[in-house]
Image: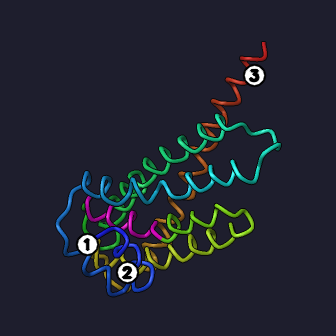
Amino acid sequence: MDIVARAKNIILSPNSEWPVIAAEQTTVKDLYQGYIAPLSAIGPVCTFLALLFFARGVGVGVGAGLVAAIVIYVINLAAVYVVALIAQFLAPQFGGRADIVGALKLVAYAYTPAWVGGVFNLIPLLGILDLLLALYGFYVLYAGVTPVMNVPKERAAVFTIVLVVAVIIMFFVVSAIVGAIIGAGMVGMMH
């Protein structure tokens, strides 16, 4: 299946697309090359283009904007895998199976609405639509838990909530560590 058809199907009809995804044989490499890498680039590229067209004169140069876009893209690529590792770890706790490829499928395809919504970053006033699509991604995630990770349907909602909370906690911990490192580096540069 091509990337456009897959993205369309997972957004518009996740309940019928997840069983198809679950049955597909793939690898981590194939998921990254054929789906994750191109789709996760949409938001950073569109944000960078918006910066070029709409944010001139606000103190952010093209070079800094490009570096920020690249950093965000790399973080997106890493975050997908880290969240998949968390999903893989949690699945057996909820009666599912620990499978890194399945977990990566779940996470990557659940991110699809947010990644596609990144196109709305081209026009800053439409950024709220990106947020709405990202929120819809939680439902897409929930819909995929049973077919992809074999978590029993009656435990899928709790699994989804625990996964989301674990990711939020991880985000804050990583942000605090990075902030401390960058803050310490900035203080060191001032002396």
- Residues under numbered marks 2 and 1 in contact, where contact means CB atoms less than 8 Å apart: yes
Mark sitting earlier along the chain (1/3): 1
For the record, the magenta segment spans 101-112
Question: Residue under circle 1?
Answer: 1
Give me the residue at 69% from left, 64% from top: 123
Mark sitting earlier along the chain (2/1): 1
Task: Choose top left, top right, bottom left or bottom right for residue 143.
Answer: bottom left
Q: Position of residue 125 (x, y in %)?
A: 75, 67
Question: Residue under circle 3?
Answer: 187
The answer to whether residue 88 is left or right of residue 69 is left
Q: CA distance from mark 2 to mark 1?
A: 10 Å
Foreground of the two, 91 or 142: 142
Q: CA distance from mark 1 to mark 3?
A: 51 Å
**Amino acid at dot 2:** Asn
Q: Secondary structure at mark 2?
A: helix
Q: Residue furthest right?
A: 57
Relative to 122, is 170 above or below?
above
Q: Residue furthest left?
A: 25
Foreground of the two, 153 or 143: 143
Q: Secondary structure at mark 1?
A: loop
State yes or no: residue 54 in magenta: no
Task: Choose top left, top right, bottom left or bottom right for residue 144.
Answer: bottom left
Q: Residues within 10 Å of mark 3 (few under 14, many from 20)?
A: few
User: Which circle marks residue 9 in the picture?
Assistant: 2
